[in-house]
Amino acid sequence: MNLPTAQPKANNSWNFPKLSLPEFLNFNKDKSLDRRISLGEKILVAADNSLEKEAGVENFKAGQYEAAIAQFSASLQTNRNDPETSIYLNNAIAGSSGNFVKIVASVPIGGNVNVAKEILRGVAQYQREVNRGKSIQGKLLQVTIANDDNNPEIAKKLAYKFAADSSILAVVGHNSSDVSLAVAPTYQKAGLVMISPTSISRNLSGVGSYIFRTVPSSRKIADALAKHAVTSARKNRIALCTDSKAQASISFKEDFTEAIYAEDGQIARTVCDFSASDFNPSEIISKAISDGANALLLSPSVEKLNQAIEIIRSNNGRLALFGNHSMYSFDVLKQGQTEANGLVLSVFWHSSEGKNISFSGDAKKLWGGSGSWRTAMAYDATKAIATGLNAGLRRDQLQKTLSGERFAVNGATGAVRFLPSGDRKGNGLLVKVLPGKVSGAGYDFVSLKP
């Protein structure tokens, strides 16, 4: 199917993708997509179900917004940490007003529900701010939640559906770089802004004028980690563990390798692939040491985080450990424990940085904690979209505003500005696993000041 580049007509309607009759019939027969999309009429995160939430969904489906508001509010009293219900509550508030704009949040509920919820918390947090006073040109904000499973083929079908829906003005998503790269052409050709809060692959840079992200590119975070490894930690020969089936992991490996050589370090010959059928953590550590490595970089995809934790346990302090952004997870603290002590990661945000005190404070009130980096980046993506829509409520106007040299918004992670490539303007920062009491696991990610 061919998607023309969308341009606004004089009447502000759009040229949307056209399908042949067989394609049209097949597309509309695919009811599986409907099961993946909800404005509030169905529950996608079944793990956070409740009787009140079920009742709220039925009320929302029937257009009984006041009743839905009451039920969703009651459900949040029981489980305040449920971002899906928070979004549905605010969608009902917007629906009852009859005056709103709509965006999509596409997340991997069926691929990694915890990652999906972290992203949805950021979206929900800023949606709440809009619907409780800030507004967008006097309008409230509705958010359609979509479950793409971190699956490129599913996401491409969803992207086509979003592109063809003129009521959708932007997309917060997607999670994995593989998915974002797969859907970018669809959004670009249809003229629909996509802002990924978590995709770092270098291949996303400059892929299209409608494609943005609130994380810096992988090169920025790789540079910070490589410089620390060689100059501060004095580890000059590093073995690499990456996922050959994940674009973000491959991209980080390439950027880190270039950065290490730029710092006069070396990369050990050790072959370590999280996706290999013969993956063996203990053998990898032994092989790296025999290859002369004095440190090990762990750059898994989200799906391979457990394998990376297995390596941490097998290492037993023999090699210094470094990691990419996927390692910035509570699971590393909880499961790694003593073996993870000293692990250094290059990331984008830490709650102690204090760049937006109100974000962290509100996150604690809403979710019971200061939020994760995914929550912070999704908050920034949603805020950037809302701020851009205040300058114009058409898709092309939003793109023009976000691309402007003067565009800037104060997000959870500081100023949000976009480079001409669509990348976030900014650098990586370092965190280190050390004993602590904040996370509840006995260890915390502590910010390393330069």
Image: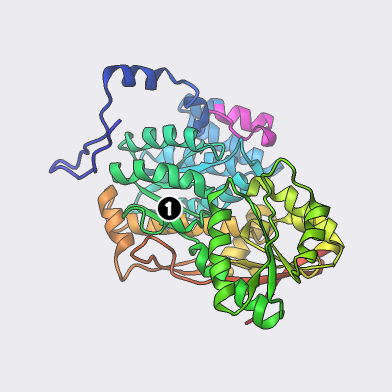
Depth order, front residue of 379/288: 288
**Which residue in the structure is indicated by mark 1?**
195
Question: Which scheme is used to colour this image of the protein?
Answer: rainbow
Which quadrant is the C terminus positioned in? bottom right
Q: 409 above or below 366?
A: below
Q: Residue at x 83, y 61 (%)?
A: 315
Which quadrant is the N terminus positioned in? top left
What percent of the width, then of the height, locates residue 96? 43, 37
Secondary structure, mark 1, is strand
Give neighbour class at mark 1: few <14, some 14-19, many 20+ (Cα, 10 Å): many
Callout count: 1
Q: Residue at x 53, y 50 (%)?
A: 247
Relative to 345, 309 lies left or right: right
Relative to 211, 305 lies left or right: right
What percent of the width, then of the height, locates residue 219? 51, 67
Q: Residue at x 44, y 55 (%)?
A: 203
Depth order, front residue of 179/287: 287
Relative to 290, 393 lies left or right: left
What percent of the width, then of the height, locates residue 392? 27, 54
Residue 331 magenta-highlighted: no
Type of amino acid at the residue the image marks with label 1: Ile
Depth order, front residue of 440/259: 259
